Image (cartoon, grey):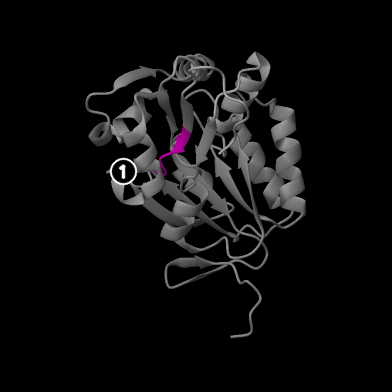
């Protein structure tokens, strides 16, 4: 827990990672934090993930791209003496709300106790469905250019491809954005075989969940939307009995 000399009457802010979505993959710590909260704040879809925990609580939800206002409201409630759960999917420190919450408290110079509750990431839950693609070094790159310029994203993609990292892609496409995924494919093809295994997992832990293994030269056709996670193998990655394996280096 992060705290200093708390402001008079200040409550507490939990920044909670809910994992991929279903109750079975929600940690006990995440559940306890939401149950302890007087106020729950989050994106509408994330609030739905904790519907079983929020009866009788003050709930504030809003839509996509309203992250800053949600964080400000959560901080306001905590400063007013409430225990607040600011929820997001996956892990709050991985493209989640933890960084924004800490930055906002720093900018406002408010001293609210903050506890960040880890969650199961999309990378880890997708990997479990595919086999063991992340057994050695890997990196994660988001292809969303809402907050990060496209040229910076592609610089990172080039570095990951050249370094032979297994690479997990978050937010691979949207209704208006597919070119970054196509560019990413071409960059990886400069460094890896067209037959490099690629895993595509859609709707992790939801009714629409699906997992498919493709190859670097053809995986794009199976990438549906923002809730798809893509795992691009490296030069050592192979497929065995319908699973993707990336060897750790043990002699077996």
Q: Position of residue 27 (x, y in %)?
A: 39, 48
The residue identified by callout 1 is 206
Residue at image location 60% in from the left, 60% down from the top: 196
The span picked out in magenta is 15-22
Residue 190 can be seen in this image: no
Q: Position of residue 108 (x, y in %)?
A: 64, 14
User: Where is 52 relative to 250, above or below?
Assistant: above
Q: Position of residue 239 (x, y in %)?
A: 51, 69
Q: Quadrant of residue 241?
A: bottom left
Image quadrant holding the C terminus, namely bottom right
Image quadrant holding the N terminus, namely top right
Residue at image location 75% in from the left, 44% down from the top: 158
Residue at image location 30% in from the left, 46% down from the top: 23
Residue 88 can be seen in this image: yes
User: Where is 210 relative to 241, above or below?
Assistant: above
Q: Position of residue 219 (x, y in %)?
A: 52, 49
Q: How many marks?
A: 1
- Tell me which secondary structure the magenta stretch mostly adopts: loop
Q: Between residues 112 and 16, which one lies in front from this camera angle?
A: 112
User: Where is 33 relative to 8, above or below?
Assistant: below
Query: Callout 1: 10 Å neighbours few (<14), some, many (20+)?
Result: few
* For residue 188, side relative to residue 91 (left or right): right
Q: Quadrant of residue 98?
A: top right
User: Where is 144 relative to 221, above or below?
Assistant: above
Q: Between residues 194 and 233, which one lies in front from this camera angle?
A: 233
Could you tell me which secondary element the residue under label 1 belongs to? loop
Q: Between residues 229 and 196, which one lies in front from this camera angle?
A: 229
């Amino acid at each position: 827990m992060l705290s200093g000399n708390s402001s008079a009457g200040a409550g507490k802010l939990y920044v909670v990672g809910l994992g991929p979505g279903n109750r079975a993959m929600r940690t006990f710590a995440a559940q306890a934090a939401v149950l302890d909260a007087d106020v729950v704040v989050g994106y509408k879809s994330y609030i739905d993930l904790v519907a079983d925990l929020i009866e009788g609580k003050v709930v504030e939800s809003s839509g996509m791209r309203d992250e800053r206002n949600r964080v400000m409201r959560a901080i306001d409630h905590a400063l007013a003496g409430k225990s607040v759960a600011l929820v997001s999917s996956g892990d709050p420190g991985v493209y989640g709300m933890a960084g924004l919450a800490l930055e906002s408290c720093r900018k406002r110079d408010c001293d609210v106790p903050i506890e960040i509750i880890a969650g199961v990431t999309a990378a880890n839950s997708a990997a479990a469905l595919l086999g063991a693609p992340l057994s050695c070094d890997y990196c994660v790159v988001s292809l969303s250019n809402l907050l990060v310029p496209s040229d910076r994203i592609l610089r990172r993609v080039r570095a990951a491809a050249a370094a032979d990292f297994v690479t997990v892609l978050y937010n691979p496409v949207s209704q208006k954005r597919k070119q970054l995924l196509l560019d990413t494919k071409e960059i990886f093809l400069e460094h890896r075989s067209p037959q490099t295994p690629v895993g595509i997992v859609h709707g992790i832990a939801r009714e629409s969940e699906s997992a498919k293994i493709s190859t670097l030269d053809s995986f794009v056709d199976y990438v549906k939307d923002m809730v798809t996670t893509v795992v691009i193998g490296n030069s050592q990655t192979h497929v065995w009995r319908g699973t993707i394996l990336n060897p750790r280096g043990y002699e077996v």
